[in-house]
Image (cartoon, rainbow, N blue to C red):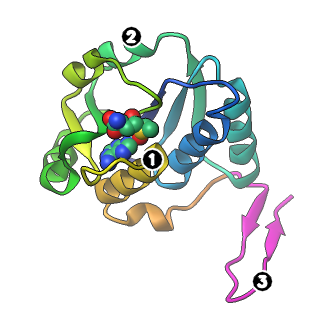
Amino acid sequence: MQGEPEVAVLRYGHRPGRDDRMTTHVGLTARALGADRAILPGNASQSEETVADITDRFGGPFEVESTEELPATVRDWEGVVVHLTMYGEPVQDVIGDVQDARESDPLLVVVGGEKVPGEVYEEADWNVAVTNQPHSEVAGLAVFLDSLFEGRELSQEYEDARSRVIPQECGKRVEELE
Ligand code: SAM
């Protein structure tokens, strides 16, 4: 969120075709729920393009980029690393410590795909579970970011938008700004 240390989301792994929508939704959820940047695997270029298009239309600031270096992105991160996994510590138990750490340091949130290698568990400062039940990287990311920002992200303003949704009790209204 603007004026705060960076929160970046790394999508760790992508199976082209099968994971296209899920990887796109990781990026869109990161943007909508207060993260500053999404880092997607290099083989997810369609998802990268979609997230960039949405940012162009509905505003930012939000960056999306790709990397061929997933392990190095985690290993070399200068800040704190949270890895979301059903096997981790309950989010409600550790979120206070994560909030304290990111007051001064950028935070990398790692969400997996099919399989996350063991070194990510070891390199993470926290392995965090949003319940210890299996579900989805998109759901896990959304709940984690909402816990991190304590709901402040729900009312964030977007800059340089070309379109803006005007909330309606019923129906759809989109204002075109240019
Ligand atoms: N066995 C995996 C795990 O470690 O959570 C589930 C794989 S799931 C198909 C893909 C990703 O969803 C995981 O890598 C993790 O980032 C996220 N995920 C699934 N369930 C989660 C949970 N209960 N808490 C946090 N993240 C979860």
Q: Earlier in the sequence, mark 2 or mark 3?
A: 2
Q: Residue at x 55, y 47 (%)?
A: 31
Looking at the rendered structure, the kind of residue marked 1 is Ser
Q: Amino acid at mark 2?
A: Ala
Alpha carbon distance from label 1 to label 3? 29 Å
Marks 2 and 3, Cα distance to the nearest angstrom?
46 Å
- Whether residue 6 can be seen here: no
Q: Nearer the viewer, residue 12 or 163?
A: 12
Residue to which mark 3 is pinned? 171
Q: What element does badge 1 sit on?
A: loop
Residue 165 lies, with reference to residue 3, above or below; the image says below
User: Sequence-wise, which precedes: disc 1 or disc 2?
Assistant: 2
How many marks the image carries: the answer is 3
Q: Is mark 1 within 8 Å of ligand 1?
A: yes
Which label number is shown at residue 72? 2
Q: Quadrant of residue 73?
A: top left
Cα separation between marks 1 and 2: 24 Å
Residue on which the image places disc 1: 136
Kindly state the secondary structure of the residue where label 2 is placed.
helix
Density class for disc 2 (Cα within 10 Å; few <14, some 14-19, many ≥20) is few
Q: Residue at x 27, y 30 (%)?
A: 81
Circle nearer the N terminus (1, 3): 1
SS under mark 3: loop
Q: Percent x, y for residue 178?
A: 87, 58
Is residue 126 in the magenta section?
no
Mostly what secondary structure, the magenta segment? loop
Mark 1 and 3 residues: CB-CB less than 8 Å, in contact?
A: no
Where does the magenta region start and end? Answer: 160-178
Amino acid at dot 3: Gly
Give x and y (percent) for residue 68: 54, 11
Where on the image, by quarter, is ligand 1? top left
Q: Residue 100, how many percent across, how many down?
A: 16, 46
